[in-house]
Image (tube, rainbow, N blue to C red):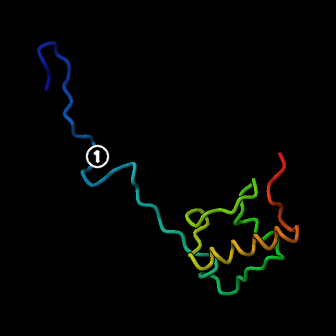
């Protein structure tokens, strides 16, 4: 469609399918590392293992980031806090 000056008029519909919304793309569900691997045992004395669940500032990563289930996220939190208490992990990173 064009108006009298020859400019194109756009309708309100976008070029996407009606069901597709780029803001709310479905992402693949993360699988809990501790549930999937039965040999993987969480230990508060193993700092390298716990660093996967802590960001560079020393904060514990949330479930949506780690992909852990609720039960294992509680175990991760407890292990990180124990490791901090005995000075294996820092409470906060130095800048």
* 16 to the left or right of 70: left
- Residue 45 drawn above or below residue 25: below
Q: Quadrant of residue 92?
A: bottom right
Residue 25's x, y, as percent?
40, 55
Residue 43 pos. (x, y %): 78, 79
Q: Percent position (x, y) of residue 45?
A: 84, 76
SS at mark 1 in the image = loop
Q: Tell which residue pokes out farthest to the top in this image.
A: 5
Q: Residue at x 72, y 83 (%)?
A: 41
Quadrant in which the N terminus appears: top left
Assign the C terminus to one quadrant of the image: top right
Say if 15 sits above or below 89 in the image.
Answer: above
* Residue displayed at 47% across by 65% down: 28
Residue at (79%, 76%) from the top-left corner? Answer: 44
Q: Give the number of callouts.
A: 1
Task: Give the residue drawn at x 72%, y 75%.
Answer: 78
Residue 20 percent location from the top left of the image:
31, 52
Above-or-below relation of 51 to 93: below
> Which residue carries the number 1 mark?
16
Rendered image quadrant of residue 73: bottom right
Q: Residue furthest right?
A: 87
Left or right of residue 32, residue 9 in this image: left
- Which residue reaches farthest left? 4
- In the displayed structure image, the side of residue 4 where residue 87 appears, left or right: right
Quadrant of the image occupied by residue 47: bottom right
């Amino acid at each position: 469609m064009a108006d009298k000056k020859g400019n194109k008029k756009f309708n309100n519909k976008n070029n996407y399918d009606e069901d597709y919304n780029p803001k709310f793309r479905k992402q693949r569900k993360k699988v809990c590392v501790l549930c999937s691997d039965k040999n993987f045992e969480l230990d508060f004395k193993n700092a390298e293992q716990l660093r996967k669940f802590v960001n560079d500032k020393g904060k514990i990563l949330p479930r949506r980031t780690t992909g852990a289930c609720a039960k294992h996220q509680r175990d991760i939190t407890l292990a990180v806090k124990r490791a901090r208490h005995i000075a294996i992990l820092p409470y906060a990173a130095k800048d």
